Image: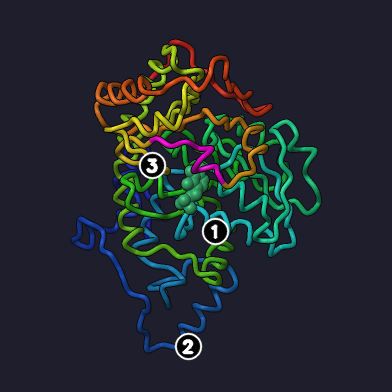
Amino acid sequence: METTPAPMRALATEAVHAGRDDLARQGLHAPPIDLSTTYPSYDSRGEAARIDAFATTGADPEGPPVYGRLGNPTVARFETALARLEGTESAVAFASGMAALSAVLLVRSSLGLRHVVAVRPLYGCSDHLLTAGLLGSEVTWTDPAGIADALRPDTGLVMVESPANPTLAEVDLRAVAHACGSVPLLADNTFATPVLQRPVEQGARLVLHSATKYLGGHGDVMAGVVACDEEFAGRLRQVRFATGGVLHPLAGYLLLRGLSTLPVRVRAASANAAELARRLAADPRVARVHYPRIGGAMIAFEVHGDPHEVIAGVRLITPAVSLGSVDTLIQHPASISHRIVNEGDRRNAGVSDSLLRMSVGLEDVEDLWTDLNNALAVTPPRGAGLHLNAAPPRGATSHHVPAVASAP
Ligand SMILES: *Cc1c(COP(=O)(O)O)cnc(C)c1O
């Protein structure tokens, strides 16, 4: 797509220009949406050569793709832009975050490397995919300090989330990457986004996003993406071609549009979240607040009363799973996002029954606080002394918010 690599530009500049550098020369401003499923060619010898090249390296075919499952020009713009933001050579987009994770697991297990080492908590369905071994993988759960000892000759992947869904526990990515040795480290960067953290700079080889969340940013696109080196990207494209979890071009367009406001959205929502975290931490109805050291727009908090009543009590805030939208969302992880995780494993990972997870949006912070304050007011205590302060996972830092939380 981009013929001349642009010089190093700041994140805010990349957000609005990456993946679009050719547009002005074409006399365009908004990127075109290419909905073609197939690409006519009178040169079938040339097509054969292009398919052979793709089968060997997985590199994006030069010129138009042969067929939509091999690649799409609009989706490629989003991939180019996300790679620039994450500081990687390449990125490969999929139909959802789970399709992206599945492709990573398939790339590794196709090499006979079926074993995965992972740190809890992870997003509930990622935990489920690994635990159930749905793709033939076998998982060893450990804390960050145990990673080096958990590695085996057939370990193909180490997986962490930081900040983690839903507790916002953070891991030291640099230390974890060191412990991985030559095994690729996959960091799920959905919560932090490249605005707050670029895991590749700390030694991760693979960066996963549920693009459904902050990258899209408006709750209307489902997508996933892996940012990585070109060698791994080639393998991912080959798996995507063979298994079919492609992203629709319209979704690619919406994601590229979402990226252009990502830095502004993440900073504004994070400032709201830091203020709400500060107020929640000072509130006697709240037992505990988790807010990451690196900041961000996600808050997790445990209430003394019934968390279901808080969900039932919000009026402005949207009671819904998912996150990263322009509006504020709240959900109860033990009931929804992490329901599929075995109860004991869930609790051990710090996901207590009193935990609520809130994705803070762009509303006025006073309106948000009014709504939250009202919702908390209607929560009857579940019983005196019932205090579910689960310990954070060992080796993971969990920032128990003191009276002051700094706005990033
Ligand atoms: C939502 C989410 C996923 C899964 O992404 P989908 O787009 O829903 O498939 C993976 N990781 C994290 C951290 C998530 O929040």
Spatial CA distance of label 2 from label 1 is: 26 Å
Q: Above or below — where is 311 with respect to 108?
A: above
As drawn, is 166 to the left or to the right of 73? right
* Res 300 visible: yes
Q: Are marks 2 and 1 in contact (CB under 8 Å)?
A: no
Image x and y of residue 127, in percent: 61, 46
Residue nearest the viewer, comparing 221 with 205: 221
Residue at label 2? 45
- Cα gap from disc 2 to disc 3, whole angstroms: 52 Å
Q: Quadrant of the C terminus?
A: top left
Residue annotated with mark 1: 233
Q: Is mark 2 within 8 Å of ligand 1?
A: no
Q: Earlier in the sequence, mark 2 or mark 1?
A: 2
Horizontally, residue 13 falls left or right of residue 358, namely: left
Q: What residue did someone put label 3 on?
A: 320
Q: Nearer the viewer, residue 285 or 115?
A: 285
**What label does residue 304 carry, if any?**
none
Q: Amino acid at mark 3?
A: Ala
Tag 1: amino acid:
Ala
Q: Tag 1's secondary structure? A: helix
Camera-side residue of 342 and 41? 342
Above or below for 45 versus 122: below
- The magenta segment is 330-339
Which residue is at 41% across, 30% downward?
Answer: 309
